[in-house]
Amino acid sequence: MVEWEREWAYEGGTSGAAVYNAGPMLENDSEAVTEEDSRMLLVADTCRREYEAYLEKLCGMGFRKVFENHTGAVDCCQLMKGEDLLYVYYTLRTGEVRVIADKASVPLDEFSDSYMEEGPAAHMWGTMDSAEIYQYGLYYDPCNGHSPTTTNCGMFYIIRLRDNRLVMIDGGHILQCSAEAVEGMYRFLRRITGTAEGERLRVAAWIFTHAHDDHMAACVRLLRTYPEAFEIERAMFNFPSHRVCSGHSDFFCLRATLREYCPNIKCLKLHSGQRIVLANVCFDVLYTHEDAVRLEAPEVFPFHDFNCTSVILKMTTGMGTIVWLGDTSTETEELVVRTVPAAMWKADVVQVAHHAFNFLTELYALIDADYAMVPNSRYGGNAGDNHQKLMDVVRRLPSPDNLWYEDETTGFRFEEGSFRVILKEDVVGGEHDGTALMG
């Protein structure tokens, strides 16, 4: 049995012979582990009764529950005692419990918008007006390739909440962030919020699906170009430890930027079963890299493709739902179709995974979306082998016109049972101008 914190020992099941380093939030772990690194104990061959007894044990030791949720996939609970924050969840279909000593997150009862929790309805956000969702246009290589100044991947989404704050998802590649492109992003954010020059743009949360360099550059460039223009309240992601599973080095630049420009930011390491409410939007976490860890080698991330570290989120706003897949790959698909019940996948809109580079036939069938957003250009999404992979999505839509590409900016709202287009604009900026990521 692993030498876990003795007082937190799980009674029952079969504990892993080592702990999994689930990584820090903002600290730099390029040279060594950090004080922020979260550690996870995996317990197999257990049951709900033993899981519930474990929670009772922790509460008896002085922990208090700050969040609890029961989904069709997991029972989960976040507990706090002094500075110790534990996230514990039981995966129903596999009989596994994961105990995570989370060293960097804000407790969930402080992270979500508290006024939502005080509302009269448990699913209050579902009856509110829809947020505005923007698939922000990026410049893609016109030949679906790579060059010193272009790339064929990247992803950037912007959500405007009912209180005029923003939620940002990812942020494209540095080659899509020329000076002209970044100024275009900045002007766009001011325009859709009606925020005057000199007033700060309020970002309720910046979400990063995973630590690849084509998903984070806009955050770094916007903050370093307009250092007084943004108030970023929260960061949400779950990057694995660099010592366990390395992404691209750009995520060290991202962390350094957030540390420097957002000293008061609230951080949340995403774990399966979490529910985060921000104004009129709710995010449910369906998968993180922690779910893939196996008992036979509990210190290792077992999947070969780093894209499998992408978190999967289901978002609810107004009366509509979107599944955000990031760069989800086939190894993740094989796991989650077994562990997350079919009813939890159904959504109105799907973000096509990994720029249409992957087949996810089973997962797209479960999501069964009426609309799709593609983080790639029209040409790139249909070039070569990508075409058949994208058609795997399109053939499930009521109309092929219910699909939009990211070589233009498109805005949407859920209204009267449809995902209505409210804005269309051309991409601002072209090939990269040589500006370095850190400026």
Image (cartoon, rainbow, N blue to C red):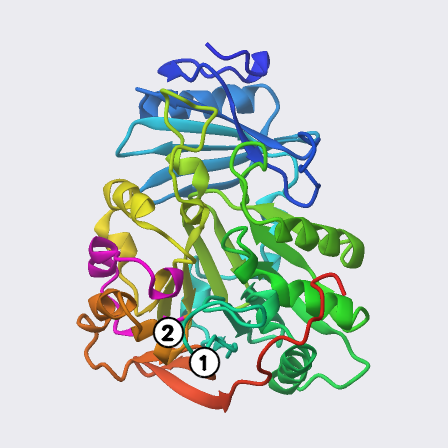
Percent from the top left, x then y, of residue 287? 40, 46
Q: CA distance from mark 2 to mark 1?
A: 10 Å
Percent from the top left, x then y, of residue 181? 63, 80
- Name the residue located 36 percent from the left edge and 14 percent from the top edge: 14
The image shows residue 118, relative to residue 230, as above or below, that is above
Residue 213 in the magenta stretch? The answer is: no
User: What residue would you read off at disc 2?
Assistant: 380
Local packing at callout 2 (Cα closer than 10 Å; few below 14, some 14-19, many 20+) is many
The image shows residue 142, relative to residue 216, as above or below, that is below
Q: State the extent of the magenta-drawn residues as a range.
A: 354-374
The disc placed on residue 196 is none
Residue 118 visible in the current orientation: no
Callout 1: SS:
loop
Q: Quadrant of residue 393?
A: bottom left
The disc placed on residue 407 is 1
Judge left or right: residue 306 versus residue 25.
Answer: left
- Name the residue located 49 percent from the left edge and 55 percent from the top edge: 209
- Name the residue located 61 percent from the left edge and 75 percent from the top edge: 163
Residue sitting nearer the eye, 383 or 298: 383
Which amino acid type is marked by label 2?
Answer: Gly
Is mark 2 in CB contact (under 8 Å) with mark 1?
A: yes
